[in-house]
Amino acid sequence: MLLRHGHAEEGRDDFARRLTDAGRRAARQAGQALVQARFQPELVLTSPAPRAQETAELVARECGFDGAPRADQALYLGEPRAYLALLRALPETLSRVLLVGHHPTLSELARQLGEGAELRPAQFVDLALELDRWGEL
């Protein structure tokens, strides 16, 4: 599952931007939509940017995920290949992963994986891929 972070405040320091109230509401709604889709992540990966981490935490809480989202620097301003490298290294025991990141990388990654979506803030795309292991991505 790929999820773009919620709407963030404007600011000069891109990394430090936080979610707006509307962004927090949209993140909670995305989490509720994932519950309705019967998606409960086994792992939540997120960019370390505060807006992405806050989105990941709100969505994870709504989904009933009881762990802490795992931040990875490669997800901040990374290219799709950096996102793929992170996913390819996941253990085979995981089958449901939520990845929270940034635009335009997530939209590009979704297109590469066969889902032609242009993700809006707090929008997700479900990629039900037939894989035996993550390394096949």
Image (spheres, grey):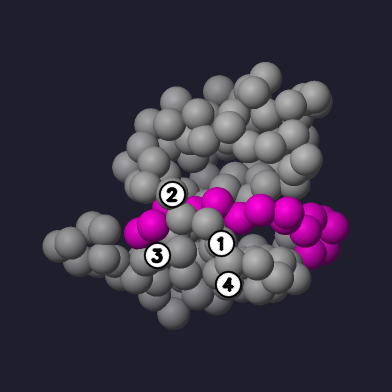
Residue, disc 1: 69
Residue 66 x %, y %: 70, 70
Residue 117 is tagged as none
Instruction: Tell me which segment is drawn in magenta.
Output: 35-49
Could you tell me how far apart the alpha carbons at marks 3 and 2 are, in whole angstroms?
Answer: 14 Å
Helix, strand or loop for disc 3: helix
Could you classify mark 1 by the number of other residues whose Cα lies within 10 Å: few (under 14), some (14-19), or many (20 or more)?
many
Query: Which kind of residue does numbered mark 3 sit on?
Result: Arg
Q: Is residue 83 magenta?
A: no
- Residue occupied by mark 3: 51
CA distance for labels 4 and 3: 11 Å
Dot 2 amino acid type: Asp
Q: Is residue 115 left or right of residue 83?
A: right
- Residue located at (46% from left, 55% from top): 71
Name the one closer to the observer, 26 or 127: 127
- For marks 3 and 2, give the one nearer the viewer: 2
Circle 3 crowding by C-alpha within 10 Å: few under 14, some 14–19, many from 20: many
Outermost residue, left side: 12
Residue at 73% across / 54% down in the picture? 42
Label 1 to label 2, Cα distance in Å? Answer: 10 Å
Residue at mark 2: 72
- Return the disc, 4 or 2, that comes first in the chain's sequence: 4
x 61%, y 55%: residue: 44
Q: Which residue is mark 4?
A: 58
| Whether residue 111 can be seen here | no
User: Would you call the spot at circle 4 few (<14 residues within 10 Å), some (14-19), or many (20 or more)?
Assistant: some
